[in-house]
Amino acid sequence: MVEGTHGGFIADSRQFPVVGVRWSGRLEELALVDAFGEWLSEFIVRLEAERRVAVLVIDVREASRPTAAFRRELTRTRAGQRERLDRWIIRDIVVTENVLMRRVLRTLQWVTPWVHISPVGALEEGFELAEGLLRERGEADLELFPSALFGEPGRGV
């Protein structure tokens, strides 16, 4: 878990190859983006070493709208690792209850098809999509528990 003054993120890889990232609070400190970039680099090194792909389920339901500077820096961080991300991360599934944000992300996906983002409204929906994507890649016998993500009590899907 990485916490800033007003916001932070936690990454949970206990259900690998589905990996949860939850952003919370006010997303304004660029140091959080730096910390996320470091985590992402280390995670990609792990994927490369194991020669495995993963799906990121990114939960933003507990976060406020990021500042423009935060969004810009996060975009730069991701763009700087695009080639490696494209190879090892099948998709970013963004969980948000905000219908407008889901529409914006769908438009982004349409305008920039190389950006592999799928917005969903619920964590369970994100896990179902992740499971389908991984099965298409030959991952079988996945036992996923969306409610157990981030240390919450588990139940099967």
Image (cartoon, grey):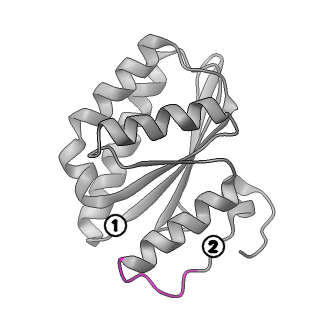
User: Which quarter of the figure is the N terminus placed in?
Assistant: top right
Q: Amino acid at mark 2?
A: Leu
Q: Determine which residue is flagged by label 2.
A: 144
Q: Does 147 sit above or below residue 110?
A: below
Q: Secondary structure at mark 2?
A: loop
Residue 44 shown in magenta: no
Q: Does any portion of residue 118 appear in the rendered image?
A: yes
Q: Does 56 sit above or below residue 136?
A: above
Q: Quadrant of residue 144?
A: bottom right
| Residue positioned most to the bottom | 141
Cα distance between the residues tagged 1 and 2: 16 Å
Q: Position of residue 105 (x, y in %)?
A: 48, 36
Q: Position of residue 151 (x, y in %)?
A: 72, 56
Q: Position of residue 53 (x, y in %)?
A: 34, 66
Q: Does 71 sit above or below residue 129?
A: above
Could you tell me which residue is drawn at 36 percent across and 41 percent down? 110
Left or right position of 92 against 28: left
Q: Does 102 sit above or below residue 140?
A: above
Q: Nearer the viewer, residue 116 or 140?
A: 116
Left or right position of 73 against 23: left
Q: Quadrant of residue 77?
A: top left
Residue 138 shown in magenta: yes
Q: Nearer the viewer, residue 10 or 18?
A: 18
Q: Secondary structure at mark 1?
A: loop
Q: Which mark is residue 53?
A: 1
Q: Which residues are magenta?
A: 137-142
Q: Position of residue 99 (x, y in %)?
A: 65, 35
Q: Amino acid at mark 1?
A: Val
Could you tell me which residue is drawn at 40 percent across and 55 percent down? 91
Task: Please tell me whether the stretch drawn in magenta is mainly helix, strand or loop.
Answer: loop
